[in-house]
Image (cartoon, rainbow, N blue to C red):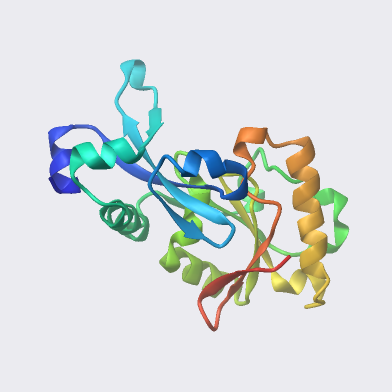
Amino acid sequence: MALQDFIEIKAGTKIRGCLINTERNKALLEEIPHRDFLDLSLVYTMELPSPEDRRRNIVADNSFLASWGISEAELYESVYTELENGTEVLFERMDAITGQMINWEDYPDASSLPLYVLTNKNLYCGAVQMLNKKILRDAADTMGTDYIILPSSVHELILVSVDWGGRDPGYARELAGIVYQVNETQVPESDILSYHVYRYSRENEEITIAA
């Protein structure tokens, strides 16, 4: 049975992707289909209809693949196609969004630079946009530079221009220190994505671990 056939049979079911930390979820990853990405893993969730329009998400495990008769590659293709479709992307200036995770007033050197939030419109597992090549390119064009990706949580990312540190190689380590502090003091343990920060190259259109 093809994935699209399953979705049509299970009306209202949506297959989505979610990035989680590989090292922190080793036991879980042994039981579920996934795809590695740097120090992270893409897993697959099903958004099911529930009473009172409340979202109910469950993680697809290996038994689901067997019962559906589909492969991890088919799941990935479905998720990636939806990502590049772009209908659920939310990419905004930080100052346009309330409830930010990091208090940038504590870091005056960054106060003059535009900061951006990248997530999805339902603010759930929005860090999966790290796999969306189109929005990553668009973000680089908007900012006009390479940028650092701060994993605020599994639900959102913060993008910071490389100009923040005057292109000093040490700036990435400083930003990683900020992420560490925020993870330890503000982010629920289940929502921690990574203690690393990442760099997006506008020229190569690739993400690497920066620190």
Q: Nearer the viewer, residue 117 or 196?
A: 196
Q: Residue at x 20, y 40 (%)?
A: 68
Q: Nearer the viewer, residue 34 or 91?
A: 34
- Residue 40, above or below 167: above
Q: Is residue 108 visible?
A: yes
- Drawn side of residue 83 relative to residue 118, left or right: left
Q: Is residue 7 visible?
A: no
- Drawn side of residue 107 relative to residue 135, left or right: right
- Drawn side of residue 203 relative to residue 34, left or right: right
Question: What quarter of the picture does the N terminus occupy?
Answer: top left
Which percent across, then down, holds residue 162?
Answer: 71, 72
Q: Residue at x 39, y 27 (%)?
A: 55
Q: Nearer the viewer, residue 24 or 100?
A: 24
- Residue 134, above or below 97: below
- Residue 136, above or below 102: below
Q: Residue at x 29, y 25 (%)?
A: 49
